[in-house]
């Protein structure tokens, strides 16, 4: 499991980057989604897989008792998910507006339209 997850992260980053560099705007959105998923999985892997209790300090202890799950990567992951949704929503609205204006979602066609004006 510890070797599978980094390979999965690398594959998601590579496929996401491939789609982001594509000429079709729908594939750019798909690439952004995959890049966000890869980032979330990366943060999950970096945080470590810990089976144990929560990091809550009970009344009889002064520090948390091992083993416990680190809450910081979990908080970062939740923040990354929210930011990813915001970026995806913005890109979908932006690409929809570009399609409504230019009647095309291919980057090459948008360059041709720009040269005519």
Image (spheres, rainbow, N blue to C red):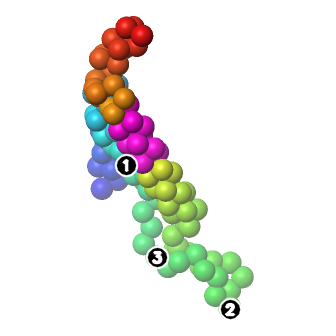
Q: Is residue 35 left or right of residue 104?
A: right
Given residues 8 and 1, the one toward you in this image is: 8
Q: Which residue is mark 3?
A: 52
Residue in the image at 68% along x and 91% along y: 59
Residues under labels 3 and 1: Cα distance? 25 Å
Upstream in the sequence, badge 1 or badge 2? 1
Label 3 vs 2, first from the N-terminus: 3
In this image, 106 relative to 53: left or right? left
Per the image, the residue denoted by label 2 is 60
How far apart marks 1 and 2 lie (CA) works out to 40 Å
Q: Residue furthest bottom?
A: 60
Relative image position of residue 113 (x, y in whole percent): 35, 14
- Residue placed under numbered mark 1 in the picture: 37
Q: Is residue 88 magenta?
A: yes
Q: Residue at x 33, y 50 (%)?
A: 5
Of residues 41 and 70, which is closer to you in this image?
Answer: 41
Residue bounds of the magenta highlight: 87-98
Judging from the image, what secondary structure is the residue with disc 3 in? loop
């Amino acid at each position: 499991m510890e070797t599978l997850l980094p390979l999965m992260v690398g594959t998601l980053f590579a496929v996401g980057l491939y789609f982001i560099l594509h000429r079709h705007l729908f594939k750019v959105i798909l690439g952004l989604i995959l890049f966000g998923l890869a980032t979330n999985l990366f943060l999950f892997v970096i945080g470590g897989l810990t089976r144990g209790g929560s990091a809550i300090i009970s009344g009889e202890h002064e520090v948390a008792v091992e083993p416990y799950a680190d809450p910081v990567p979990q908080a970062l992951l939740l923040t990354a998910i929210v930011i990813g949704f915001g970026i995806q929503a913005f890109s979908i609205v932006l690409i929809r507006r570009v399609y409504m204006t230019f009647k095309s979602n291919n980057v090459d066609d948008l360059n041709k339209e720009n040269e005519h004006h």
